[in-house]
Image (cartoon, rainbow, N blue to C red):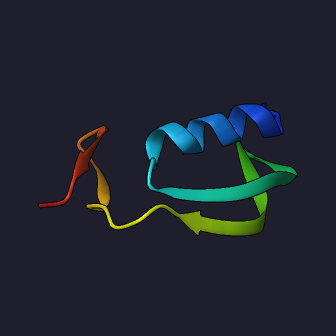
Amino acid sequence: MLNDRQHRSVAAEVVSFLWFDTTIDRAVAAGDHTLVLLRLHSVAHAGDGAPLVFHRSCFRQAV
């Protein structure tokens, strides 16, 4: 399971112009997966940027 610091660093790398400040609220067993529910504390953005799209197993910029 990810701790708060690991989750935040992943979010910062994937969505570089948008920042979600979250903490893990709880983890729920879902068969052979674990569903992690986050508590959102704040949202910030840094200027305008092209949105990212997750398609075919990777992130791409929307054109």
Quadrant of image for the C terminus: bottom left
Residue 58, horizontal then vertical, whole percent: 29, 38
Judge by depth and name the residue closer to the eye, 33 or 46: 46
Q: In which quarter of the image is residue 39?
A: bottom right
Residue 5, horizontal then vertical, whole percent: 78, 34
Q: Tell me: 39 left or right of 13.
A: right
- Residue 21 appears in the picture as rendered: yes
Judge by depth and name the residue closer to the eye, 54 or 51: 51
Q: Residue furthest front?
A: 47
Total number of numbered discs in the rendering: 0
Q: Tell me: 57 left or right of 14.
A: left
Judge by depth and name the residue closer to the eye, 13 or 26: 13
Q: Residue furthest left?
A: 63
Residue 57, horizontal then vertical, whole percent: 30, 38
The structure residue drawn at horizontal position 72% and vertical position 50%, both measured from the top left corner, is 35
Task: State whether residue 10 is above or below residue 41.
Answer: above
The structure residue drawn at horizontal position 26% and vertical position 61%, both measured from the top left corner, is 50
Quadrant of image for the N terminus: top right
Q: Which residue lies furthest to the right in this view?
A: 26
Q: Quadrant of residue 40?
A: bottom right
The structure residue drawn at horizontal position 23% and vertical position 42%, both measured from the top left corner, is 56
Task: State whether residue 55 is above or below residue 20.
Answer: above
The structure residue drawn at horizontal position 81% and vertical position 40%, both measured from the top left corner, is 4
Residue 61, horizontal then vertical, whole percent: 22, 52
Q: Tell me: 36 left or right of 12.
A: right
Task: State whether residue 21 is above or below residue 41.
Answer: above
